[in-house]
Image (cartoon, rainbow, N blue to C red):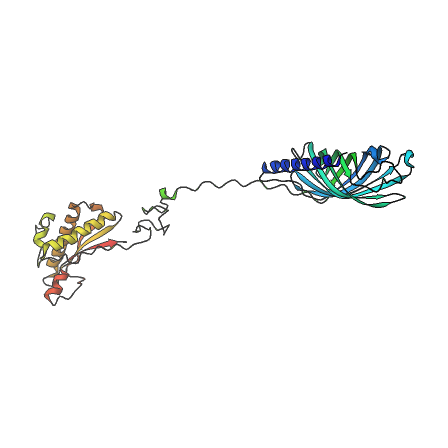
């Protein structure tokens, strides 16, 4: 065979192998395969290059050791041997040929079906005859088909072309047609036997977790703050919370809403008449009451007790009734401004009990004449 033609054939075939292998690998992003080591005893025959001056057909035998490196590719290290008989026209006799090399195989199709493949290999070839011995490089290309027959064994049949850059086994002394290389066709049969326990079947893929519900639409603890914004989940029912869902103490301060001495009078408990009962300046006291209304509207879960108090001047019984009238007039003011009565406890009067200042001065007594909105926690 023309050597330049052979080089071109090798380059073209190896390029095709690479492209086919890359395309096949891209088709499977999660490959699975049996990666155990195997041995592959081989027997086959050569159809020899006629320029070898050797009988055209010879038997060879060998042994390979290898493994799959991907679902569709394997690598074998091998050794094989053949004995060749020279033609009688060039002196007869025989010579031997040992090859030591590595072969890659690229497979197509499902693992358990008949899988065609292509192969390419390189090797060192050792020739030995009566007159000479030595090494030369060699290479092979071929095709084959493989079939898995058990969990641990395959059968391979392959054919191809092996070129040997041998310039010693046929010399001018024993042939008028000495060459610097020879090409032989070959056909081989191999029994592949994997050793070791087969790999366990891959576990089934876990089902994807269900999509998480939209936390912005959930309020697990019922506090009015969605789960996305709630930094204090699982607050007890009825807890007053702020915008972050954490408990918040609501204070409704009515300090500054003070009453005139001995007011409101009996009959002056309507919300519209509250101005008559308030100490000057009345406008400031009304503003404080309006702030209390706004707070209750912003926190609809808040409930309060409306409680009234007096200073220490006067009889206890009279002061009790007076404190009740003060609680009542504030109670009516809140309900007349949109606060539902179900959120208000009372009105309750405490008379001159629980003073917040001294009753010994005018200023102290003025502060004791008051009402309170006591938040129920």
Residue 189: tell me if it is visible: yes
Residue 164 location, x and y as percent? 78, 39
Q: Which of 327 and 220 is in front in this view?
A: 220
Residue 176 location, x and y as percent? 87, 36
Residue 264: tell me if it is visible: no
Q: Residue furthest bottom?
A: 360
Residue 341 location, x and y as percent? 20, 46
156 left or right, relative to 347: right
Q: Nearer the viewer, residue 140 or 166?
A: 166
User: How many marks overall?
Assistant: 0
- Quarter occupied by the C terminus: bottom left
Q: Which of 44 and 191 is in front in this view?
A: 44
Residue that appears at 7% across and 53% down: 276
Residue that appears at 14% across and 61% down: 367
- Quarter occupied by the N terminus: top right
Q: Which of 160 and 91 is in front in this view?
A: 91
**Residue 287 vertical position relative to residue 156 in the rendered view, above or below:** below
**Residue 116 vertical position relative to residue 76 in the rendered view, above or below:** above
272 left or right, relative to 191: left
Quadrant in the rendering for residue 145 = top right
11 left or right, relative to 308: right
Residue 229 location, x and y as percent? 35, 48
Residue that appears at 70% across and 36% down: 8
């Amino acid at each position: 065979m023309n050597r330049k033609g052979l080089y071109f054939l090798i380059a073209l075939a190896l390029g095709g192998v690479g492209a086919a292998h890359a395309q096949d690998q891209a088709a499977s992003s999660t490959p699975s395969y049996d990666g155990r080591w195997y041995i592959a005893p081989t027997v086959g025959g050569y159809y020899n290059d006629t320029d070898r001056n050797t009988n055209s057909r010879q038997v060879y035998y060998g042994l390979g050791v290898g493994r799959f490196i991907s679902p569709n590719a394997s690598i074998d290290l091998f050794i094989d041997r053949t004995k060749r008989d020279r033609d009688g026209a060039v002196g007869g006799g025989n010579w031997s040929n040992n090859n030591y090399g590595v072969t890659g195989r690229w497979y197509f199709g499902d693992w358990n079906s008949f899988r065609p493949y292509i192969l390419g290999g390189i090797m060192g070839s050792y020739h030995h005859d009566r007159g000479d011995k030595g090494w030369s490089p060699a290479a092979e290309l071929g095709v084959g088909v493989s079939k898995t027959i058990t969990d641990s064994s395959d059968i391979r049949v392959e054919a191809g072309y092996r070129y040997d850059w041998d310039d010693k086994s046929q010399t001018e002394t024993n042939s008028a047609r000495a060459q610097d290389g020879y090409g032989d066709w070959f056909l081989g049969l191999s029994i592949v036997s994997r050793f070791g326990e087969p790999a366990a079947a891959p576990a089934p893929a876990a089902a994807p977790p269900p999509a998480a519900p939209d936390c912005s639409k959930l309020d697990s603890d019922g506090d009015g703050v969605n789960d996305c914004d709630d930094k204090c989940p699982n607050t007890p029912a009825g807890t007053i919370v702020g915008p972050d869902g954490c408990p918040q103490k609501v204070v409704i301060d009515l300090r500054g809403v003070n009453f005139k001495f001995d007011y409101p009078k009996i009959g002056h408990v309507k919300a519209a008449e509250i101005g008559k009962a308030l100490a000057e300046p009345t406008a400031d006291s009304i503003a404080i009451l309006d702030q209390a209304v706004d707070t209750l509207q912003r926190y609809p879960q808040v409930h309060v007790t409306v409680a009234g108090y007096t200073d220490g001047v006067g009889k206890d019984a009279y002061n009790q009734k007076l404190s009740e009238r003060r609680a009542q007039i504030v109670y009516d003011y809140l309900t007349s401004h949109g606060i539902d009565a179900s959120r208000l406890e009372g009105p309750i009067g405490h008379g001159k009990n629980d003073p917040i200042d001294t009753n010994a001065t005018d200023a102290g007594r003025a502060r004791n004449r008051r009402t309170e909105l006591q938040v129920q926690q």
